[in-house]
Amino acid sequence: MEQRLRSEVKALLEQGKIDRVIGFEPGSLKFTTTPLITSDGGDVDRLVINPFIVNNLSTYLTGTSGRVGIVAKGCDSRSIVSLIQDNKVLRENVVIIGIPCSGVIDLTKVERLAGKDRDELDDIVRQGDKITVTVDGKKKEFLASEALFDNCLGCEFPTPREYDILLDEPVTPSPDKAISEQKLDSLREIPPEQRWQFWKEEFSRCIRCYACRNVCPACFCERCFVEESEPQWVLPVPRWQDNLIFQVIRSIHVVGRCTDCGECERACPVNIPLRSLTREMCNLAEELFNYKVGIDKEAPPLFIAYELEEAEDLIR
Amino acid sequence: MPVVSQHARMPSSVCSIDILHFTGVKLKQAKEWEPKLLGFLCRWCSYAGADLAGTSRKKYPASIRVIKVPCSGRVDPLFILKALQMGFDGVLVSGCHPGDCHYQTGNYRARRRIAITKKFLEYAGIEPERIQASWVSASEAVKFTGVVTEVTKGLERVGANKLFVDEGQGDGTATAQ
C-alpha cells in the first residue's frame, strides 16, 4: 500500500494534477506519525502508511491553497465530504487518496496490555486480527480489538466512500456499538445529577488550550465564539462553568460535521473523554433526523435541511 | 399604593422594612423561591400572542421574562446555556407554527437546533424541563398562558437551578433578575 501511495503521489505531482500533498510521515517519537505537507516530489518517499496514522488530515485542507492531494481513512474522507457540503472545500480541488482502514492503534491500550511504557516496547506489528508486541525480545500477541481506539471499534465506514484513488481492497465494516460506546452507556445509566457532576469534575481539569478545537476539521470558524468580546460569552479563564459551556457549544456546532474520528479526545492534554460528548451528537443526529455525516456530498448540511414534520414530540 | 413593592425581585430586606415602617402592616411571608423562566418569543407570532394575553387580561405566572427575537431561528443554543449559567431556572423558545414562519423556514431550523440541544443537554445532565419550546401563534393567547403555566409547574417540580453554582463561590456571573 505504501509503495503504491508513493508512486501515485509522485505521478500526480509530476503530471501537475496536484500542487501539494497532505500525508503522514514517521513522527519523532516511537510509534507515532506526523502530518507531512509538501509540494516537492523528493519528499514523497517519506510518506508512510501504518497502524499509527491517527490524525485526521482534513483539518489542514481549509488552510491549504491550490489543488491538494490528501491521504484519507474512512472517517477522514467523511470529514472531507462534510467540508464539501459546507462549501469550505471544492471537490475539484482535492484528490482524495483513500486508505481502506481497519482501525488505528491506541498506544495507551497497548501500554496497558503489555504492562510497559511505550518507550520500552521494541515493536508493534498488526496482522489481521492480531497485534504482536515485542518487549525485551519476547513476543506477546493480543487481539486487535483490544488495542484499537474506541471510535475505530464502532466504525461503520472503514473504507472511504468518496475517493479518487483507493489504495487497497475495501474493508468490510464490523462495528461493535456496545464496545465503542462503553463509556457513553455507563454515563447513560447514572442519574442526571451525577452525570452533571461527572462533567463538572472532568471540566475542572480543562486548561482551555483549545487543542480539541484546533485539531477538529469540523471547527473551521474563522472566529470562535469563545474569542468574542462583545458580548463575552465565556471568560477566557479556565473555570469549569465556562469550560463546560465551551465544550457543549462546540459539540453542538460540530453536530452534523463530526465523524467520530476521535481527534479531540486524542489531542486533549488532560484526558477529558470528549468523545463521549461528540459521539452522542452523532447518535442524536441519526436518531432524530436520520442524518449520517459525510455520506452524500450533494446533501445540505444538517442544520440547513429540514423535514416538514419531525421532532414535534419535543415541542409543545 | 400596593403593599408589595413593584420590584418583586428587590432584596426583601430593603423593601419590607420600608413598608413595615410606613404602614405597620405585616407583610405576607415572601415566597421562598419562585421559578425564573426566560422566554425567547418570536416577533411575529409568540410575542404578539403574549401581547394578546396581556391585553385580554389573561392570567399567567409572573415567572417569565421575555426577550423579543426576530425569529425562533435566531435563538442560538448558546443563548439557552448562557441563560442557565446566569441563573434562570428554565428557558422557553417560542415561535410560529411550522409552515407559518415569516421567513418561510426559520422555525424549521429552530426545531432541529432546539431538539438537538434539548436532548444533548439532557444527556449532559440538565433536566429536560429546563429547556422548553412551543409554537404559539399571534391569536393563541390562551395557548400562551397555558404553556407558561405548565412550564412553570415543571420548573417548580425540578426546583431551583443550581447547575452552575460552586459551593460557597457562586457562579461568578450576574444573577438573573
Image (cartoon, helix red, strand yellow):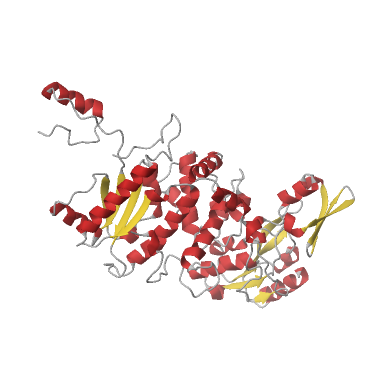
Vertically, is A295 above or below A46?
Answer: below
Horizontal side of residue B131 vs A194, given as left or right: left
Residue B60: image location, x then y, percent: 22, 48
Tell me the quadrant of the picture where the N terminus of chain B can be found.
top left
Image height of A121 relative to A86, above or below = above
Q: What's the residue at 57%, 50% (across, down)?
A: A274
Q: Quadrant of residue A39?
A: bottom right
Q: Quadrant of the C terminus of chain B?
A: top left
Quadrant in which residue B139 is drawn: bottom left
Camera-side residue: A247 or A21? A247
Numbered label tally: 0
Residue A93 drawn at (x, y percent): 56, 73
Tell me residue A252's x, y (percent).
47, 56
Q: Residue most toward the bottom?
A: A15
Kindly tell me whether residue A256 is visible in this rendering: no
In the image, B148: left or right of A182? left
Q: Nearer the viewer, residue A84 or A124?
A: A124
Residue at the limit of the structure toward the right, as seen here: A137
Q: Is residue A77 left or right of residue B23?
A: right
Q: Is residue B36 visible?
A: yes
Left of A95 or right of it: where is B158? Answer: left
Determine the residue positioned at 21% across, 57% down: B142
Extreme left residue here? Answer: B1
